[in-house]
Image (cartoon, rainbow, N blue to C red):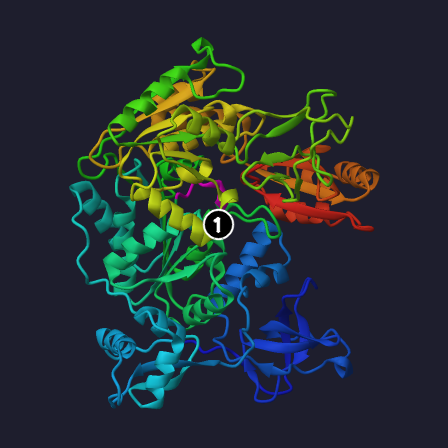
Amino acid sequence: MHLPEFYDAGDLIAVLTTQPLGRPLDYRAPEGGCCLGAFVEVPLGPRKVLGVVWGPGQGDYDPAKIRAAYRVLDTAPMREEMRAFLTRAADYTLTPLPAMLRLATRAPGLGDPPSMRKVYRRGTREPDKLTAARKKVLAALSEYGDLSFTLKELAEMAGVGTSVVKGLVAQGAVLEEDSPRDLPFARLNPALPAKELTADQAVAAERLAAAVASEQYGTTLLRGVTGSGKTEVYLEAVAAALRQGRQALVLLPEIALTAEFLTRVEARFGARPAEWHSGATMTERRRIWRMVAQGEAQLVIGARSALFLPYRNLGLIVVDEEHDTSYKQEEGVLYNARDMAVLRASICGAQVVLASATPSLESWVNAEAGKYAKLELTARFGPAVMPQMRAIDMRSEALPANRWVSKMLQTEVEARLARSEQAMLFINRRGYAPVTLCRACGHQIGCDDCDARMVEHRFLKRLVCHQCGESKPMPTVCPACQAEDRLAPVGPGVERLAEEAAALFPQARVATLSSDMYGSARALKAEIEEIAAGAADIVIGTQLVAKGHNFPNLTLVGVIDADLGLQGSDLRAAERTFQLMRQVAGRAGRAEKPGTALLQTYQPEHPVIRAILAGDEERFWAAEAGEREAAGVPPYGRMAGIILSGTDVGMVFDAGNALARQDAPLRAIGAQVFGPAPAPIARVRGRHRVRLLVKAAKSVPLQAALSRWVGQLPLKGDLRVAVDIDPQSFY
């Protein structure tokens, strides 16, 4: 085993901190010395900051002014493969290395010594008086054997007050002990029996398990129709990693998916895995970070940032719903978790499974070219069959101006209600109405800080900007002309659709699934569980409902505006519309009862709508790939977005024009520069935004040229520049 290089006290070391300084700084090794990769606390001006020993010092600074690191933190050193991952990710995304380190240290209290907490377990004595409440506590402890619990956990489990537990402690019937706060996670058992797999599933599972057993890097596209059992297949790859003593990571695109998924994992392996996402408490995040580094968390289920945890022996990364746009980080460090998963696995010799019913065109092309292995599941699991898909031509529907559910769709919903089945109405717009218009002067209420219309959220009784998050109360008079009672909502949102559904189907229980309407991730997950258990007859949903949820009694999906995603100039518009419609339709008929999906459209002849209805996915991907290849755009070419922003619009445009004129580094590699032009949303949070778009051949060294090009720009005042490699959106 190769031991980390060690530096004796006083040796010159380079420390990378999380501060925006651009490079490692020289320090003296602390008393007792430190190893390469050690987490250290160092002085920076008057502050103490977190850093990682990145190598030997450069020695290009006055030795008399070099200060010593304070101490080495009591946590596992950063492994060589993690440092390589952060470095290569920074180089690819053109992100300063300290910003990458911040992603890898997003847990509180890493510098704190291990903390303790009080835990309680069964003692050897009997209480002098056995009350009903005391019996409950002792029964709860007996049920779980030698396990110990916190005071709150034990009291809640027994259904008594904490004073009852304290009374038993005083008599020795319950023992109070100190225990480390950051405990290892329960061990998962890959030997437990798995669900019975179909022949196709078994073949796919065996191939994935064999790939994991090779202990070499490889990526597999696991493509299966909605409801085909992809999860059960890749859980067998997880089992293979656990049998080898390696760790596994499963990335999910939406926190609301985790509740059902964790239940399936627990059923397969006998214990719950670590759960890393924005809904986790700070205490839990510190525990997960430390246990992952020590190898005491075998499996992590998480959002995209879970890629940056300090795995000790990572053997498998699963990217579920790999096509999902939420894997692209659009603020701060701009990266695509799908691509970073492949990069991380290639460095540590792990396998990657990209799972989707509607894969991204990038993954489809890589599989077709043989760069990725490919496994396909073409049928739904058990008796379930794929839903029938039909279009409703809205040109022939005589709907009033304030109605969006067609007569045909209404009739189909009523039929499902009569059979005690669930129906879903889908529209990809949050809130009540996308525009609030004054009928007196025509003014549309916009955000004060962004060039975006504010969206009415009637549930919150506020107008909300979906760009910056600012909100304000619903006005009673027009802010432009002061006219009273002339403000009107224009267009439908999910809340307005719910209002219409309640009027059309007064006896039905209507549930609305939108991330805006729940105060916490736990509340949203609880609502989804209740709907799956039959607590609603009609589900009204936004894009959230397309992400892998399983509602067994849902037999009808009605898409209110199937044309919505086809608008605009986004090069991925056709791909995303195809994916979204197929995913939403896949919520129907996932159990014994057959399903139907109806798409309301004003363009039934549109090639994308026809491809969705026909279900000929190979033909759609081949046609889309042909168009992209002819245009030389991703995945057959490279693109990068340059976003300049500042509070002075003139300064921002001047900087954009100067950058466009100084394009020699890009011309040298044959790249083209388009712009500058105002971003489609030209002002966000009070900052004016100008975009340039760079297009290049796939084989050229784009990052190096971009670095030289953007490096020419002096950042005066509050001018900022962001580089987005492989942009997924163009807002």
Residue 603 vs 493, above or below: the answer is: above
Asked which quadrant contains residue 434, the reply is top right
The local crowd at label 1, few if under 14, some if 14 to 19, many if 20 or more residues have their Cα within 10 Å, is many
Asked which quadrant contains residue 657, the reply is top right
**Nearer the observer, 729 or 240:** 729
Look at the image and say whether residue 531 sits in the magenta stretch.
Answer: no
Q: Position of residue 82 (x, y in %)?
A: 49, 64
Going 43% across and 54% down the picture, which residue do you hit? 522
Look at the image and say whether residue 325 sits in the magenta stretch.
Answer: yes
Going 73% across and 29% down the picture, which residue do you hit? 478
Q: Position of residue 163 (x, y in %)?
A: 39, 79
Helix, strand or loop at label 1? It is helix
Q: Position of residue 690 (x, y in %)?
A: 72, 37
**Nearer the observer, 441 or 585:** 441
Q: Residue 213, can we see it?
A: no
Going 54% across and 55% down the picture, which residue do you hit? 89
Say which amino acid is labelled 1.
Answer: Ala
Going 28% across and 59% down the picture, which residue do you hit? 266
Q: Residue 170, can we see it?
A: yes
Q: Position of residue 418 (x, y in %)?
A: 26, 26
Residue 594 vs 214, above or below: the answer is: above
Question: Magenta residues, as a range?
Answer: 321-326
Residue 216 vs 167, above or below: the answer is: above
**Nearer the observer, 674 or 225:** 225
Q: Which residue is mark 1?
A: 337
